[in-house]
Structures are given as C-alpha cells and as structure tokens.
Image (cartoon, helix red, strand yellow):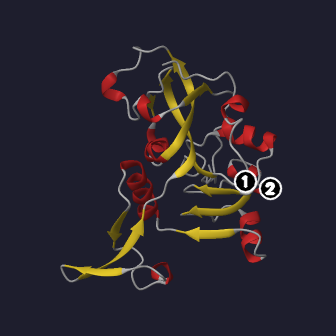
Amino acid sequence: MNKTVPTADAAIADIPDGATLMLGGFGLCGIPENLIAALVRRGVKNLHTISNNMGVDGFGMGLMLEAGMIDSHIGSYVGENKLLEEKVIRGELNLTLVPQGTLAERIRAGGAGIPAFYAPAGVGTLVAEGKETREFEGKSYLLERALKADFALVKAWKGDTHGNLIYRKTARNFNPMMAMAGRITIAEVEHLVEPGLLDPDQIMTPGVFVQRILQGRNYEKRIERRTTRPK
C-alpha cells in the first residue's frame, strides 16, 4: 500500500517518448513543478499534453515547450506563452483549444468511464467543425469525446503514503479529475503524512486513483501576472 517514491526523477523514469500526459493546475496554481522539472531533465520527446494552461515563458510547462518536448497540446488558455504562439504559427506544434468547462468535463468523463457526452459550448463556431450535432429540447449540442492519458501528473496540498489527496483552493480545479483520468497517476504533495492523519471527510482524491506519490520540494508559487495599484 505504500506508494511513495523517493524523487521526482524516479517517479517519471518510465514515461516514454510519445506518451500522452495530463498535467494538473490552473494558471500557475497547483502545477506539478517537481515532476515537470524531472521530465525536462530526462528529455522525454514527442509528448502529447493535456492541461488547462501551457505555463508561461520560463516556468511550468513553458520549460517543456522550450526543451522541444511537446508535439501536440489540448488545452483551454494559452495566452501567457509567446513561444507557444510562435511554434503554432510555424507549424511545429499541433494545438487544440477547448472551452474550459468542456475540457474539464471531457477529463472527468474519461475518469468516470463515460466515452462521450453532449455539450452546448461551441455550437455554430470553429469548435463545432467535424463534430456531431444533436438537438435536445430545442437547443443544439455538440458530441464531445472523453479524454484520458497514459500518465496524469498532479499536485496536491497534502497526501498520505497510500495516495489519498487533499487539494487547496484553486489547485482543486483540474487536478482531481485528471487524477482519475490517468492510466498511471503520479502525485506530488507539499505535505506527505502517514495513513490515518488525513481527515477522511476532507479527502478529495481517494488513493485508489493514485499509483505513485512523492514529497515535493522548493515550490516557487509564482504569480502569473501581478497587478498593483499605486500607493
């Protein structure tokens, strides 16, 4: 039952070139910083990534982009990364943008074993191209397919050695459903404790969904875009 691994490098050692990865987080909040850094050190190539954001230049998934590790990306918001824009324009990276709520539900469906569902977002836009459309109660909906991944890399606030996880605030947006949708889920946590020390009523991802867990280190907790008022 003890699922701990000693280092981030050990946790991702078997991720092969060409794998499909989900990476949790919202903006720069709740991203698996240690696991991303380990992937960059290892130099895995031709990855297909699924994440709400693509980090920023020089941080988060931006480091993977700079290292030329990503072939394709499915996400919702990519406006903070200039290199991604350049790669897409040059045809070096295949980008699929998905409405944020639809992205979250596609991932949740993948974890729940639901192959597809109908959603209203994107009807009549470029998002609808190539998708089946059906009408329910006088309103049009698009068929959206579930998303799953070979590996899900998530970040939680607390976890125990059995893999039970508790997230904090905004980090709860995408990490919980990604933890369910990965064939192998690897979690890094700010605080790793022994079983029995987490309040069962507060556990958000049960350990059954997590295959590996590690104690994270040296979190920067950057602010994506700082806006201040003059004094």
Number of numbered tags placed on the structure image: 2
Q: Nearer the viewer, residue 230 or 21?
A: 21
Residue drawn at the location 72% of the way across and 53% of the way down: 62
Residue 151, given in percent of the width and then of the height, sits at 58, 44
Q: Residue at x 76, y 47 (%)?
A: 44
Q: Is residue 128 left or right of residue 228?
A: left
- Locate residue 56: give its quadrant: bottom right
Residue 134 location (% of width, % of height):
30, 80
Say left or right for 215 vs 86.
left
Mark 1 and mark 2 in contact (Cβ < 8 Å)?
Answer: yes
x and y percentages locating residue 197 in the rendered image:
41, 14
Q: Return the residue nearer the eye: 156 or 207.
A: 207
Residue ID for mark 1 = 62
Amino acid type for the residue under numbered disc 1 = Gly
10 and 66: which one is in front?
Answer: 10
- Categorize mark 1 by other alpha carbons within 10 Å: few (<14), some (14-19), many (20+): many
Other-residue count near label 2 (Cα within 10 Å), few / some / many at <14 / 14–19 / ≥20: some
Look at 72% across and 70% down and name the residue there.
85
Q: Which residue is mark 2?
A: 66
- The image shows residue 172, relative to residue 95, as above or below, that is above
| SS at mark 1 in the image | helix
Residue 142: x percent and y percent? 37, 76
